[in-house]
Amino acid sequence: MIAEPFWWDSAAPVRGDGVLPARADVAVIGGGLTGLSAALTLSRGGLDVVVIDGAALGAGASTRNAGFLSAELRRPLAALIERFGRARALAIAREARRAAAFLKALIDEENLDCTLHMSGRLVLACRPRHYHRLAEEARLESRLLGASVEMIPRAELESEIGSDLYHGAKLQAQCGVLHPGQLLRGLATRVREAGATLVSDNPVMSVRGARSRFLVTTRAGEVSAGRLVVATNGYSGRAVPYLRRRLVSLDVHMIATARLAPDRMRALLPQGRACIESSRIRRFFRASPAHDRLLFGGRASQRASVERAHRELASAMHAVFPQIRDVALTHVWSGRIALTGDGLPHAGERDGLHYVAGMNGAGIAMGPYLGHQVARGILKGRKPASPLLGTAGTRIPALAPLTRPLAPLVERYHAMRDWMERLR
Ligand SMILES: Cc1cc2nc3c(=O)[nH]c(=O)nc-3n(C[C@H](O)[C@H](O)[C@H](O)COP(=O)(O)OP(=O)(O)OC[C@H]3O[C@@H](n4cnc5c(N)ncnc54)[C@H](O)[C@@H]3O)c2cc1C
């Protein structure tokens, strides 16, 4: 069994070939999808950009995820309306749709070969009451957002999934699946072609300065930059305390099965859709791009060792699909997501430090979109109009100085809510 993402077999994270310059117009910290997207826009806008990553570019969540391209935010529309009021909630939900459209256009225009397939996504009801909740959500989404959603009752679920665990599903047509490793590599190539310097395996240790001059100290030296973009999301550490205080980072795990014969794979997911559960600690799964493996992911107990977390995940997979108990696992891996106090991604600027953070586990489209928006703001010298971009109301609420130790508590709270729902 390989303890690396399945995606890395065909598209490993990217090693930078650049040397840290003494000066740059903009330093981007974090070479995942978000940082690279910002770097592409900035470089094409004529600025001298250096992207710095502590590991290989993309070795964070960007090449460890499930590859679901979703037009949805993690928080359902009704919850957004309750919290922010109708007008702002709709603006935020539309922003998620714009993000998905942005990524699709980027893939198209930049010719990023990442096997994007608009498969649709099933949100699988884990309890009968979840089905009714999903149906209400579907009505609201199609009425207020014009979303293309359809409810599939339990009796008809057989044509969608080879499991009798679920009580129906909501089908979201505007979602797809892609190969995250290929997406990352393609984007890195375009950024390099645009003239940016890509530096990998060189962690940023500290950042000093403000407004128009920053001194970024890395393990291999210093760079002086006029502007700073921080795109470290779930991997945010001590270098930028402002972000670290506002994010709870959680480990999310994934496993891949050995190859399955085409008829066996078809019996599991006949339509090849992306699948996600309706519970709070959601498991998600899909077929590999060649439709010959099952990729299964989810959060496990945050205190568990990585090995135990992967075992927990394998038993969850077997509970959904007992018919593949005999199939070996070939890959196990984990990645880090960042949660925010209000469940929304945020982008903004503080004393000249630009940031994009808090994707809440759904940043494949939102990360690049917000990275691009922040970059446009820098180029134009003004804040772009987005409900997720640094207005006072969207500033990330500070959570605690020690957000990493909070992770098991957050996890336990969600597990308890799932457990209580089962009792009702
Ligand atoms: C298992 C899993 C499954 C997921 N599935 C999905 C999905 O299906 N759909 C979806 O939309 N989202 C999904 N996500 C979330 C998605 O992957 C992330 O939201 C997205 O990749 C975030 O991209 P990013 O560029 O902002 O951050 P990352 O890709 O995490 O990149 C952050 C980078 O910052 C670097 N860094 C951190 N600190 C420093 C430092 N001090 N100096 C230099 N570099 C530093 C890290 O090395 C890292 O490369 C999933 C996440 C995980 C973990």
Image: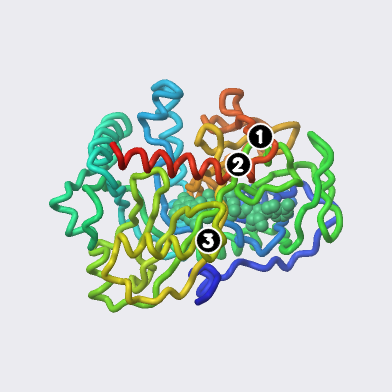
Secondary structure under the numbered disc 3 in the rendered image: loop
Residue 44 in view: no
Mark 1 packing: few (<14 Cα in 10 Å), some, or many (20+)?
Answer: some
Foreground mark, 2 or 3, reads: 2
Circles 3 and 1: CB atoms closer than 8 Å: no
| 96 in relation to 204, above or below | above
Query: For the residue marked with disc 2, what is the amino acid?
Result: Leu
Q: CA distance from mark 1 to mark 2?
A: 8 Å
Q: Residue at x 82, y 59 (%)?
A: 219
Circles 1 and 2: CB atoms closer than 8 Å: yes
Given residues 246 and 35, the one toward you in this image is: 246
Residue 7 in view: yes
- Toward the left, the furthest residue is 155
Q: CA distance from mark 3 to mark 1?
A: 27 Å
* Residue 188, quarter of picture: bottom right
Residue located beneath label 3 in the image = 64
Secondary structure under the numbered disc 1 in the rendered image: loop
Q: CA distance from mark 2 to mark 3?
A: 22 Å
| 263 in relation to 164, above or below | below
Residue 406: mark in rendering: 2
Q: Is residue 327 left or right of residue 341?
A: left
Circles 2 and 3: CB atoms closer than 8 Å: no
First along the sequence among labels 3 and 1: 3
Foreground mark, 3 or 1, reads: 1
Q: Quick check: is the Cβ at mark 3 less than 8 Å away from ligand 1? A: yes
Q: Is residue 117 left or right of residue 105?
A: left
Residue located beneath label 1 in the image = 400
Query: For the residue marked with disc 3, what is the amino acid?
Result: Arg
Mark 3 packing: few (<14 Cα in 10 Å), some, or many (20+)?
Answer: many
